[in-house]
Amino acid sequence: MKGYNFAYLDEQTKRMIRRCLLKAVAIPGHQVPFGSREMPLPYGWGTGGIQVTASILGRNDVLKVIDQGADDTTNAVSIRRFFGRTAGVQTTTATAEATVIQTRHRIPEKTLREDQIIVYQVPQPEPLFRLEPSRQETRRMHALSDYGLMHVKLYEDISRFGQISISYDYPVMVNERYLMSPSPIPAFDNPKMDMMPALQLFGAGREKRIYAIPPWTRVKSLDFDDHPFRAINAPHPCGLCGATDSYLDEVVTDDRGGRLFVCSDTDHCAERRAAGHVGNDGFKEAAE
Amino acid sequence: MSAPTLLSGRGLKLSFGAVPALVDVDVDLWPGEMLAIVGESGSGKTTLLNVLSGRKAPDSGVVWYRDPNDHLHDVHAMPAPALRTLHRSDWGFVHQDPRENLRMGVSAGGNVGERLMAQGARHYGNIRDAALDWLAQVEIDASRIDDLPRTFSGGMLQRLQIARTLVTHPRLVFMDEPTGGLDVSVQARLLDLIRSLVSRLRIAVVLVTHDIAVARLLAHRIAVMQRGRIVETGLTDQVLDDPHHPYTQLLVSSVLNA
Amino acid sequence: MAYVAVKGGEKAIDAAHTWLAEERRGDPALADLTVAQVQAQLGRAVDRVMAEGSLYDRQLGALAVKQAQGDLIEAAFLLRAYRTTLPRFGDSLPVETETMQIARRISAIFKDLPGGQLLGPTSDYTHRLLDFSLLDPENTTPPPPAPSLAGDSVGAIPRVADILGQEGLLEPDGGAAGTPGDLTREPLAFPASRDVRLQALARGDEGFVLGLGYSTQRGYGGTHPFAGEIRLGEVSLEIAPAELGFAIDIGDITLTECQMVNQFHGSKTAPPQFTRGYGLVFGFNERKAMAMALVDRAMRASELGEEVTAPAQNIEFVLYHSDNIEATGFVEHLKLPHYVDFQSELQNVRRMRAEQDKVAAE
């Protein structure tokens, strides 16, 4: 793209972001403030993730961009196009081929490797924000490891609903020190973060925070000994490929209660179907 | 009293602008005893409580605290995290207005369990059992465990605050007019409760009150403050039955006349 | 030199108006902006002015925008003032957004659903890169024609709210009880029912409602919102005059509607249901409709037994400060002369200082 640096940001900005990333990796789960820039996409639509990706992308990288687990959602398409125009890197929909994966609200089903980096788009980096809106106060709580407020909230859930009622953006303890928001991934995905071989980077553009989980780090979802963490997923197999262990989207097929459940991770589903797996609604796909 | 003190203040001075709030105050507290600090409003008693508990720094002077390992700590030289930890475990602070120390949007059980969870308790059933136990000890009906404090009476809120504070078995509790603003009958019940809990758990208490009757009922020793100074101190009954300082005499006689 | 009393206020005002007219016209060498151009090419400005002016008339909105030199609050003010002069013939029947001629319809809570995700003419996925080709006056190539909306649904597109409602997952809508309040005629009174609150939001300042809505997302009275459905298009307006005894269609208006699906509400005994927040606004304005739905839900906090802690949940705070014509009037009224009162203050302060000096000297 004429008149723009590789991957849009100027080199000084990229260096600033990389310094923040290094600090974040050195202190797993700790939120590092950074001088987030206005980007051509709106705040709340992935500017943090985009800035992180722009700062780590090299000419030989292969980039995958997903939103809700799918490569073809409008926002994923928009961001992939953005990097196509500004960096000219090779892009892919295959998780296995990617070196950098930028994601909104899902972790791919396929276990990631040590040579891969996953960049999460984060709307709200502060895990305590619903309980304590003041950032000044939450900074102190993180510094003093004072997370009583969050435990109280979990206690309240159990006393009110009989179970912890958080289903996404489920808070985790990273490296047994920092309370962290994993971004609004479904709780189902939380276990993937624990001891993940890949580097996990988190960018919040509007809130201006970066954080990270280095490879092979302990990540534990908050719970009680007698109310252990449980992942939530629709109790069906994928209608297209039959998978029973992937996170499912619910598609409303008619206004009489008709439903179809399909893998949210489109690459995972396509790979399974290519290998011959068929779900009970597999015939529907052929009809389109 | 040759045993080592639990808490000691020496040479405490504090002024708010031109107004002196504490003038050369020395005070001692021994383990397991209740010390009442009495005086009119403006005498400096609440300021003294705040300085002793580390909430307000004096202009000069020092406050020493002896921890369970017999180490002495300068309360105002402690790093903030250490003081914070102290306040959540070994120490407690009961406010005159219980709302200042309760989460009004959190159930009674959650309020009581919070300090346990802050210390690492991770078994919901056990935390809830501890909360139920403490609600019983402060005479709040077990059925209220999931109720929000918004629905509690003033007396109940105060008892809930006490449960929340004592759940970690602190060795030292600061109390600021714990019965202030409550009905006489509610006060009496609360005072009884405080007395029995404190003696059973052997908690040392620094209690601030303007009410001589409260001091008489609860405290082993009493310190009388007037305009920022301690004018008289000693065993409660001795001081109140035979006051030496004219101000103490005035206080005592005004109660008798009431 | 001797003081000369200030006179000539009227002459000064006339001169100010002349200068204002000059500013409005701008460089006379440039073509005068026509109202038709504003109406056709600055549609979003016209939409906002109609919403906050509480008057649906695109041409008048465009005129107000031009007259106000693009100051949209000033333009809304012009519409409101004009509205005062218009006689009220009657009220329309409630509009049916279910039978809207959809230009755009999306849901963030289902990947796909009956009626589909119809993007419409949205700027959502544009990259915000200044298009310098727009500077070139010679650049008159019209854009390629948009692909036609081949909707795969005939007739009404079912509401997402009804889809959730089928399983009882969404609280039912509070049915209309009696005549809705009318803030354009009656003063605001508390407690304010939901119809009045919605009306205040619909005509409230977009920036104010946006800020409050944003605050709920950041923890000041959070409601876990999801965009259940946003639909945008034309609805027909019907009135049922008493003389006729039946309803007649008097025209179409463009509306943007947003149904937010919010934090579920329930307990050990009452099965949890998602709760609603609603936004409806004249013209094409998703930002306003969405923010309105967030604030609507926040203001239902006490009704739903939630703690009221944040500004967006404080009904009086929101309703009293949402009207930007009232706000700008009062804020800017400080420009009016206040020197009589200030003189009293001056004398007061001087006297207090003198007394303190006297005491200090003693």
Image (cartoon, rainbow, N blue to C red):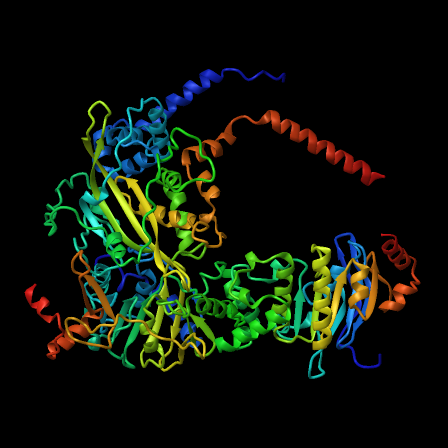
| Residue C126 image offset from top left, x and y in percent | 23, 53
User: In the image shown, does C32 or C268 lie closer to the viewer?
Assistant: C268
User: In the image shown, does C268 or A194 lie closer to the viewer?
Assistant: C268
| Residue A82 image offset from top left, x and y in percent | 23, 60
Q: Is residue B102 left or right of residue B68?
A: left
Residue at x 17%, y 75% (from the top left corner)? A242
- Name the residue at the bottom extreme: B69
| Residue C122 image offset from top left, x and y in percent | 22, 49
| Residue A126 image offset from top left, x and y in percent | 43, 64
Q: Is residue B115 left or right of residue C15?
A: right
Q: How many marks?
A: 0
In which quadrant of the rendered image does the N terminus of chain B lie?
A: bottom right
Residue at x 75%, y 65% (from the top left corner)? B207
Which of the 4 quarters of the picture holds residue C36? top left
Residue C312 visible in the shown view: yes
Residue at x 48%, y 42% (from the top left corner)? C316
- Name the residue at the left extreme: A287
Q: Is residue A160 above or below residue C174?
A: below
User: In the image shown, does C48 or A118 lie closer to the viewer?
Assistant: C48
Q: Is residue A215 left or right of residue B218?
A: left
Which of the 4 quarters of the picture holds residue B233? bottom right
User: In the image shown, does A260 or A265 lie closer to the viewer?
Assistant: A260
Which of the 4 quarters of the picture holds residue C28? top left
Residue C128 visible in the shown view: no
